[in-house]
Amino acid sequence: MTLDLNNLAITIKTLGIELGFEQIGITDIDLSAYEEKFLTWLKNKFHGEMNYMEAHGSKRYKLDELIPGTIRVISARMNYLPPDTRMWEVLENPLLGYISRYALGRDYHRLIRKRLRLLAQKITALTGQFNYRTFSDSAPVLEKPLAEKAGLGWIGKHTILLNRDAGSWFFLGEIYTDLPLPIDAPIKNHCGTCSACIDICPTQAIVAPYQLDARRCISYLTIELRSSIPVEFRKAMGNRIYGCDDCQLICPWNRFAKTTSENDFYPRHELGAPQLLELFSWNEETFLKKTEGSAIRRIGYECWLRNIAVALGNAPSDEKIISALKEKLSHPSELVREHVQWALEEQRHASMLLAGIQCP
């Protein structure tokens, strides 16, 4: 049987929508236009302690080295922004903890890969057996360049994928395949002269348009970094305890963002606007229970307390906060104790300023 590949591509996109994806695009495996930029990013050490970014050699941009026989990538995007996000409200209340909106619900990795496998199975029913592998931020894959090539959007100055009709609040996933499908054309970059994302970044991590120094990024500092958070970034973190969405919040294209219909992405355990002191009171058992099936669990309990301690240090002077911090001074983790001590010192300074006493 001879396949009509053009009709097959159209059918794949229709099936993807039926499975809950907002858009499907198809591209080839030529990432040569992105290779030098990626290698320069690594050379500049902008990846910080994310050693996995360089651990797989050229497999990130030479796709058939990762999965031999790959000639096409089916790229998919799925909205994740829940309704009633209260993002600015939480960020402006220093007694609440801000968690990046992608992490409020269940871990997206499994859901996206499951849907992609279902899509691949439906394709198999049409084509017969073919070779494929599914990914969603789960292997050495340059997801944003592939999605950009597949016409799902353009990589903005904040290095996040943007779509004219949907903003940037969406997840990406891929199917690597040996099917010789027709490819989609990339779309034009529409960032123009806008620099809103660069200007708002609390730690100035966007060091130039389209260049992110992850070592300065709050998402990196609160999620990827496992050691002490550099002191020079702690005040700028504010009450952000897991990730940071500022560059997306300010982006004009997110006026067109669509909320998700996936219940699994809705906030769980009231983490949309949680009280910092309540989160800080969790023991490890509670942390593991409350973050079961969540992307948050990957940072571990120590980093969870580390991040919250910084946020409490940035909060207004409060005896309840000081008391809660003092209780953690005997925590077995040196990492936690060091950040608690910093937070107590910040609380002391805030208390002196409130009393009109000049800090030494």
Image (cartoon, rainbow, N blue to C red):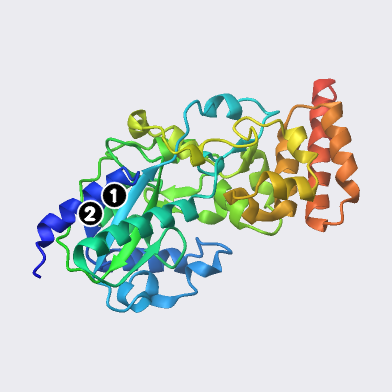
Question: Could you tell me which quadrant the C terminus lies in?
Answer: top right
- Residue at image location 57% in from the left, 46% down from the top: 218
Report the front residue among 165 and 329: 165
Q: Secondary structure at mark 2?
A: helix
Q: Can you say whether 75 is above or below 160 in the image?
A: below
Report the front residue among 249 and 182: 182
Residue type, label 2? Ile
Q: Position of residue 264 (x, y in %)?
A: 50, 41
Q: Position of residue 227 (x, y in %)?
A: 70, 59
Q: Quadrant of residue 141?
A: bottom left
How crowded is the residue under tag 2: few (<14 C-alpha within 10 Å), some, or many (20+)?
Answer: many
Residue type, label 1? Gly
The residue at which mark 1 appears reads as 16
**Residues at discs 2 and 1 in contact (Cβ within 8 Å):** yes
Q: Position of residue 112 (x, y in %)?
A: 42, 52
How crowded is the residue under tag 1: few (<14 C-alpha within 10 Å), some, or many (20+)?
Answer: many
The residue at which mark 2 appears reads as 12
Q: Can you say whether 163 is above or below 182 in the image?
A: above
Q: Can residue 271 be seen? A: yes
Q: Secondary structure at mark 1?
A: helix
